[in-house]
Amino acid sequence: QVQLVESGGGLVQAGGSLRLSCAASGRTFSRYAMGWFRQAPGKEREFVAVISWSGGSTYYADSVKGRFTISRDDAKNMVYLQMNSLKPEETAVYYCAADRRLTVVAGQYEYWGQGTQVTVSS
């Protein structure tokens, strides 16, 4: 079993930056792909970024390419999402998720954190 806890959300002005963290526990954490998703009220959960368990592969939603960076530190059981040049439309609850597969489909992820709120003001 994998447990995930996100942190680092908050209020930021448009154009600003935030760094989200996801603390993971579980003896097989290093063998899970880790993804970041976001969900705004009334909208479906949206893929943001994913990193393979080896750290060798990363994929990003087109909307965040060049602005967001996903990384992982297996020695610390941590996954990060650095978000730059944030836009108001990116206001959402941000979730980290884990699965043995490398996938961008939210419904395929086995484990989820509780989410952290990111609010981007105009």
Image: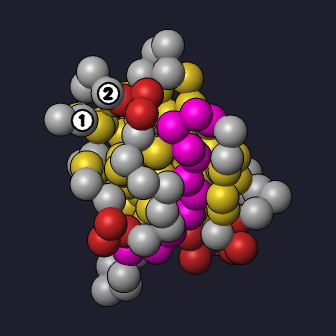
Vertical relation: 31 (above or below) 38: above
Labels 2, 1: front one:
2
At horizontal 37% and vertical 47% (from top left) the residue drawn is: 100
Counting from the top left corner in percent of width and height, residue 16 is at: 71, 51
Identify which amino acid the numbered label 2 is placed on: Thr
Please, which residue is most extreme toward the bottom here?
A: 42
Instruction: Work out how far the residue at label 2 is from the one at label 1, CA to CA, in angstroms.
Output: 8 Å
Q: Would you say residue 119 is visible in this rendering? A: no
Q: Residue at 35% across / 50% down in the picture?
A: 99
* Residue 30: percent from left, percent from top: 43, 28
In the depicted structure, whether residue 74 falls above or below residue 80:
above
Residue 37 relative to residue 44: left or right: right
Q: Is residue 23 magenta?
A: no
Residue 28: numbered disc: 2
User: Measured from the top left, where is residue 57 in percent x and y?
Assistant: 67, 47
Outermost residue, top direction?
75
**Residue 85: percent from left, percent from top:** 75, 57
The residue tagged 1 is 2
Count of numbered circles in the view: 2
Residue 53 lies in the magenta-colored region = yes
Q: Quadrant of residue 29?
A: top left
- The stretch of residues the image draws in magenta is 45-55
Q: How is the image coloured?
A: secondary structure
Q: Quadrant of the N terminus?
A: top left
Camera-nearest residue between 74 and 117? 74
Q: Quadrant of residue 92?
A: bottom left
CB within 8 Å, label 2 to label 1: yes
